[in-house]
Image (tube, coloured by chain):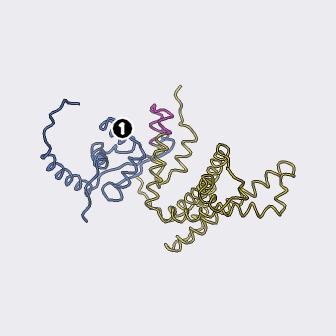
Amino acid sequence: MKRENPPAVARWILEHLVPGKKNDALAGDLLEEFRCGRSSLWYWRQVLSAFVLGFMQESRMNWSVFVFAFFWALPASALWIAVIRWQSGTFFARRWDLPWPYSMICELGLTFGSQVLYVWAGVIFGFSIFSAAKKQFKVRYLVRGIGISLSAYLITFVAFFVWRLIFPMPFDIRFVTPAGLIVSLSMIAFRMTFFVAVVAGLRSACVSAGQKKIRTVA
Amino acid sequence: MERGYLGEFELMILLTVIHLGEEAYGVPISREMEKQRRRGVSAGSVYAALERLEQKGLVKSEIGEPTPERGGKAKRYFRVTKEGLRQLHKTRRVLTAMWKELPEFKGEPA
């Protein structure tokens, strides 16, 4: 039997992650086509194509956001290692001695929490710079950007976790050399998570700030 | 302001939007493009081209009413502006002049 709705994950990616201002019309078009008999594979292809095209278009239009996110993501791996080295002398080093779920809460707080804080710091700092240049700082746009960056980071965090399961790090993170820090694929993938999250958050905040109103047909 | 000539994809989209008239929104535009080109068209690339054309002032868009069969999403209707029509005529003049130089094709038809 033909499904009424397209794959939920693809639909969510289309509505939340594809860069561009007017995704609603595209989402409606793809849904209309799907309900007219197009396959799930066709829907996925359209979503991926829209993502790539939207990303390219956005990087041309908002190149300053991409440049900022690139430089913000660069030291992320070094900061992560600094956190790991710092925690060895603290309460966090003994977190796995704690009963579940406290051990997991501590682990998530240390890794995920510290990384999210770094992403948010990037979004706040970046948005402050861009909005100061345009003289239109609004807290609700910033809050929206922070929310979007968290969603994007959750997805990329899971993707990176899966990546690490498939391709384990070939070295002990605590003793990595500066060269390993720069060229290691794992570290590049790790930085990508920050890059994507900061771009998503900043773009959302900046686009909201500069969005044009589209005329509605009566 | 003088603009560059239209690319093949943009030209086809403008002509399709004119051909569809009042019904020119994403789905029929993509279907008509697929019919004419005889190969698949990504809806994302159609929208990307339409947005470029809108930025150049060659098309205008309007949002219609949301409909349940589209999951509550509204259609975005496009129409060609006067400037878009002027660009099309200009491109046709240039291309027609250039087509005259095309030598006869002697091989088997495809």
Q: Main secondary structure of the magenta part?
A: helix
Viewer-proximal residue among A207 and B5: B5
Q: Is residue B59 inside the magenta stretch?
A: no
Front residue of A172/B105: it is A172
Pinpoint the chain carrying mark 1.
Answer: B
- SS at mark 1? helix
Residue farthest to the top, as pictured: A1
Q: In front here: A51 or A95? A: A95
In the image, what residue occupies the spot 57% across and 56% down? A196
Image quadrant containing the C terminus of chain B: top left
Front residue of A118/B78: it is: A118
- The quadrant of the image that shows the N terminus of chain B is bottom left
Relative placement, left or right, of B44 versus A198 is: left
Q: Which chain is blue?
A: B
Q: Quadrant of residue B87?
A: bottom left
Residue B53, position as x, y percentages in the image:
33, 55
Give the magenta-colored segment's residue range: A29-44
Residue B94 horizontal/vertical position (percent): 17, 53
Q: Which chain is yellow?
A: A
